[in-house]
Amino acid sequence: MGRRRTYYREVRRLSLVSPPAMVASVGRRRAAGDWRGACTAGMVDAHVDLPDVARRWGPGEAERIEAELRGFAPDLLRRFLPRLDSWALASRQQVVLSRLNVPFPARSGNAAVLVVSQPTEARAPQRLGLRVVDAAEVGDGWLDLPDWCWHADASTDRRWAYGASPERLPWHHPDGRPYAPDETSPPERPADRAEMVEALTALLAAGDVPAAYRAAGFAVDHTPPRYGSAHLVTHQLTRSSPTLPLLAAEYRRLAHRYGHRSLRFASQLAVTEDDGVLRLHAHPSAYKLPGPLVGVPAPSDVALLLAGALSAGELHPLVHEALFPGRDQHRPATRPETGKEFRVRCGGDWHLLRSTGGHLSTGHHDAAEIERELLLARLGGPITGCANAVRAWRTGGKAVPKEIRRVRADLLARLFHGDTDTVLAFVAAGLDPELRDGTGGTLLHWLSHLDHVRALPALLAAGLSLDARDGEGDTPLHRAAAAGAEDVMAALVDAGADRRAVNGANRTPARVLQEARRRG
């Protein structure tokens, strides 16, 4: 059961951070050669001027940057960006993207580098910024990602990173059949990439971390650092084990890129290559990269395929192309859960309720009866089970059964991650205009996270108020101002939002916008 929950969370994470509609739109625009359109579809603000790149770094660098932009896959990149526990993008993180073949930081003015910037705070719209900087500007705090994380053309490296050999996927036979539950890699087969990943996974699952590192080609020196405990090396290797299938390749890539033979692996460990042998040892003074040695754990998609949690059709198209070259992908239609039924105790009987999109209804009480009971409950009167369930559905209270809480949480998570299509599908199925998030905000309070051009008319038609207040007294206009989303603010004002409204801190939206500009 625990493993199934883990697989469900991982599949949900992938669908949240790069929704199917985003993936399809980015793919179409990239295939048409429209890299700016791909950025727009992938919620990326592209601050890139190619003529300016040519003036600053020369036409050769401008051509390289343009080639990187033509292959840029922001929907794929989102799966590998650093995140918080809530799956929100880590704030103020800078990410280097470049297929530059020379070591850097380079001499100033020598090379251009694509850089992605993440939101300035965790609750902000999950948009990315894209710009070009000089390689000499790469300093502390950067995360350096390999091109298989973000470039469409890196199919061969992507296949390797996902654990596949040229012949097969891990936990699969060469003909594509997955292993049976009790099956392992046949011992007579010569060692390959897929078998190595299978072996590493088995060793790590058994808790034999040192053996896993040895199987990955590392000589591990367990001598503790001068000011560290005897268990420090094993502890840090255990914490870093999800990166093990990629560690050797990333060490060699970054050792060349930054021009250092010994790279800091963890707080007091280093990787060094001597005569072709990779050695892990205590070396606190080794060169510290701007970010971690391995910026991402090994991808889990192949394990999800084996577990049946993910079908080949549900893979990201670029991952499908890498893992199943030459095979057509048939992506299934995605639909939100909009028809969940459950029973609640109401008086002396059990009543059936139904969740339809963003609305909870019961056949035993009409809407007017439920609203009247909710009003009386606010005045201190009693409340029946059905009305209490509707109240909990709207506010997130625990009276809603866990299956319904999951539908509610899924809607709010997709709202947060900018999945406009799924949110609109919920609206079309019947949205309760009183539905609130944990802060007391309506869906309109999150408009800056969505494609507001499409979402605003639909949400207003569903009955949402332009001037509804959240728990802090903010209107949707205040929230848009806090996000610095001036285009969203203009759309709300045009629709009739009160620009003079003050929140709980006695600030107007204009004042909130001024403060957001200063912070940004």
Image (cartoon, rainbow, N blue to C red):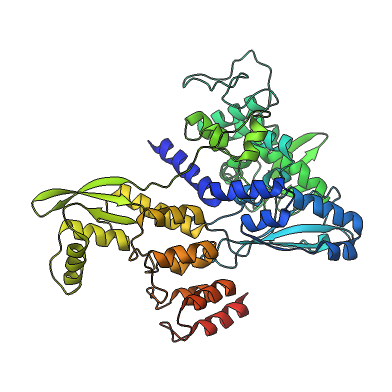
Give the left or right position of residue 259, taking residue 491 as reference: right
Q: Give the residue at x 56% y 80%.
A: 513
Q: Give the residue at x 76% y 50%.
A: 70
- The percent coordinates of residue 5 (x first, y second) are 41, 40
- The percent coordinates of residue 347 (x first, y second) are 10, 55
Judging depth in this view, the residue of 430 and 513 nearest the camera is: 430
Residue reaching furthest to the left: 348
Give the left or right position of residue 8, taking residue 242 as reference: left
- The percent coordinates of residue 445 (x first, y second) are 45, 69
Give the quarter of the figure containing the N terminus: top left
Residue 465 appears anywhere in the view: yes
Count how many numbered circles sit on residues in the image. 0
Residue 510 vs 414, above or below: the answer is below
Residue 295 appears anywhere in the view: no
Give the left or right position of residue 389, taking residue 501 as reference: left
Give the left or right position of residue 49, taking residue 25 as reference: right
Task: Tell me where residue 489 sits by quadrant.
Answer: bottom right
Residue reaching furthest to the top: 188
Q: Give the residue at x 51% y 50%.
A: 16
- The percent coordinates of residue 135 (x first, y second) are 82, 59
Residue 515 vs 34, above or below: the answer is below
Give the quarter of the figure containing the C terminus: bottom right
Residue 405 vs 468, above or below: the answer is above
Judging depth in this view, the residue of 372 and 383 nearest the camera is: 372
